[in-house]
Image: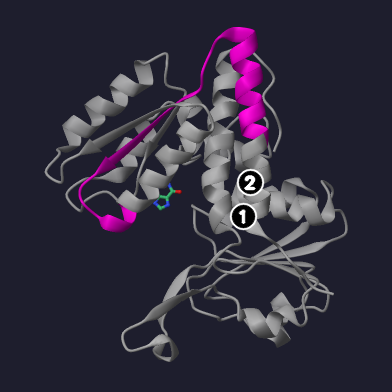
Amino acid sequence: MTTIIDGKQVAASVIDAVKSAVVGLEKDTSLKPGLAVVIVGDDPASHAYVSSKSRMAKECGFNSVQHTLPEETTQEELARLVATLNDDAGIHGILVQLPLPKHLDSEPIIQSIRPEKDVDGLHVVNAGKVATGDLDGGLVSCTPAGAMVFVRRIHGDDLSGMNAVVIGRSNLFGKPMSALLLAANATVTTAHSRTLDLPSVCRNADILVAAVGRPEMVKADWVKPGATVIDVGINRVPAPDKGEGKSRLVGDVAFEECAKVAGAITPVPGGVGPMTIAMLMANTVIAACRKAGRTPPKF
Ligand code: GUN
């Protein structure tokens, strides 16, 4: 029987753990985690993401602050806001929603966030800690951290003897995901668009993670029988069967056919997606615990 990994359910259990940690932290130290989310411009998809992040932060009992800046905000204005949030003792996590409008350069903005407040895990200090296997000292970026929660729930903390293949080598996902699997003792291959004979590389994987942005690219005959398949892709494709002009979301994995071969698999939507926000909340409470000198919870 294939396990269909329920991302909403796992995310809800992470959120419950965040809420308990918030209650404990406030009781012992009177400190309430503070999360500042910054959005620039009018992109509707980004506004939808940011609203759900702010809403979830409130639900977790955080001090949730949203800064909505106009499209014409300058680099200097945005940098000043980040500097103010860096110095604000009540703010433990800062997230600048990406992408920024074209006239703004996101890299210096992200790198100006204090690493201990970088709950997105995008600062080079945090990326470097993940790359060197220091998983307890920094903040791990939310999507790979969420994918690892699934892997741990299925295989436990120690992946010794297991082969893991990550398709995709982005700084945002593929590289940190490979580093996290390696830190858990898996034997890791990071595959990408230049990899020779990708299907046979994938067939070697006990854990197969796809993050390429190509709808339903991974087919059933790429999957080792019984493997765990984690689909990080979110692709909108036309769905004429639902009516003219309609679309639907699919992952990078051909779900129906791969589910027949895999031991466990994530659906899209409802797999990795809900975990990203949950891990943002987890990172914020971790950052607040560290600020208070308390040992942060593990997720
Ligand atoms: N835009 C889409 N996803 C993300 C995310 O996880 N973090 C940030 N900062 N921007 C995003």
- For label 1, the SS is helix
**Quadrant housing residue 290:** top right
- Residue sitting nearer the eye, 239 or 132: 239
Q: Is residue 58 left or right of residue 21?
A: left
Q: Residue tagged by mark 2?
A: 12
Q: Is residue 280 left or right of residue 37?
A: right
Q: Which residue of the protein is positioned furthest toward the left in this rendering?
A: 72
Q: Disc 1, disc 2: CB below 8 Å?
A: yes
Label 2 C-beta lies within 8 Å of the nearest ligand 1 atom: no
Q: Is 219 located above or below residue 26 in the figure?
A: below
Q: Residue tagged by mark 1?
A: 8
The image position of residue 14, as x and y in percent, is 65, 41
**Quadrant housing residue 87:** top left
| Amino acid at the residue labelled 2 | Ala
Q: Is 7 located above or below residue 61 in the figure?
A: below
- For label 2, the SS is helix
- Residue sitting nearer the eye, 221 or 5: 5
Asked if the stretch drawn in magenta spans residue 25, the answer is yes
Q: Is residue 119 visible?
A: no
Residue drawn 58% across the image and 12% down it: 292
The image position of residue 219, as x and y in percent, is 64, 84
The range drawn in magenta is: 17-46
Residue drawn 60% across the image and 76% down it: 253
